Image: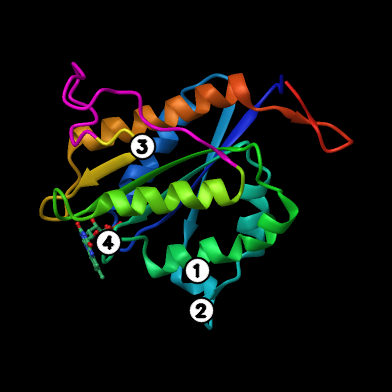
Amino acid sequence: MKTQTSVAVVYHSVTGTTAGLAEATLRGANQIDGVRAFPVRIEGGDIHEGRYRNASALKAMGEADAIIFGSPTFMGSVSAQFKAFADATSEFWFQRHWAGKLAAGFTIGNNPSGDQLNTIQYLNILANQHGMLWVGIDLPGGFDPEGRNRLGAQSGLIAHARDGMLDPADIATASYLGSRVAALSRRFVPERVENGSYSL
Ligand SMILES: Cc1cc2nc3c(=O)[nH]c(=O)nc-3n(C[C@H](O)[C@H](O)[C@H](O)COP(=O)(O)O)c2cc1C
């Protein structure tokens, strides 16, 4: 078992709601002993002629044991900026560099059912392309005493912004998701050993 595991929260946000969910996710992850969580914000300035080129950000997340992906839902999927980032990770796909890391995802839209599920499913596919292990939400939608997971998505956090504002229940769900991924990173992240195999 590693003495410390790390969780990267990689996200894009224009008007700040996805950023608010990312902050809550980080707070939740950092509450877990032995875990260091850090943000990687995808900026428009990282993208040159359509290609995401932030080598230091890619290096930092490559060293994390878990990566939580966050994007606003734009036209029923991830934002163009997030997709540019996702395409840039293909160099790690060749190397299987992210295989075995934990992954999870969150998104937000301004409609209660604005096709956010497609965004979560894209994030799940991205994780699976890399051989990552997807972590959903185990809070039963509609049955949590604290009202978390109010929209009932189990595969990731779907949030809904009203008038550009975050709902407190969505913030609480993001914090829970961060804690869950962080806690699981303490249990499941294997140590890579010299010959490329894993030891638990
Ligand atoms: C280009 C664009 C497309 C959008 N498409 C959707 C959509 O398909 N479904 C939805 O529910 N909201 C959609 N929205 C609303 C955003 O998802 C919403 O405002 C979100 O809170 C923005 O996240 P941010 O504050 O992190 O930038 C769209 C917004 C923009 C600007």
Relative placement, left or right, of 198 versus 6 is right
What is the span of residues highlighted in magenta in the rendered image? 132-152
Instruction: Report the front residue among 85 and 5.
Output: 85
Name, please, the residue furthest toward the top.
145
Q: Is residue 29 visible in this depiction of the protein?
A: yes
Q: Position of residue 3 (x, y in %)?
A: 70, 21
Quarter containing the C terminus: top right
Q: Are marks 4 and 1 in contact (CB under 8 Å)?
A: no
Q: Nearer the viewer, mark 3 or mark 2?
A: 3
Please give the label number shown on residue 114.
none
**Along the polypeptide, which appears first: circle 1 or circle 3?**
1
**Mark 3 vs 4, N-terminal side:** 4
Report which residue position mark 1 lands on.
84
Q: Is residue 14 above or below residue 24?
A: below
Q: Amino acid at mark 1?
A: Ala
Which amino acid does the dot numbered 2 rest on? Gly
Question: Picture coordinates of residue 12 (x, y %)?
Answer: 40, 58
Residue 76 is tagged as 4
Crowd class of label 3 (few under 14; some 14 to 19; many from 20; radius 10 Å):
some
Q: Are marks 1 and 3 in contact (CB under 8 Å)?
A: no
Q: Neighbour class for label 4 at 10 Å: few (<14), some, many (≥20)?
A: some
Q: CA distance from mark 2 to mark 4?
A: 20 Å
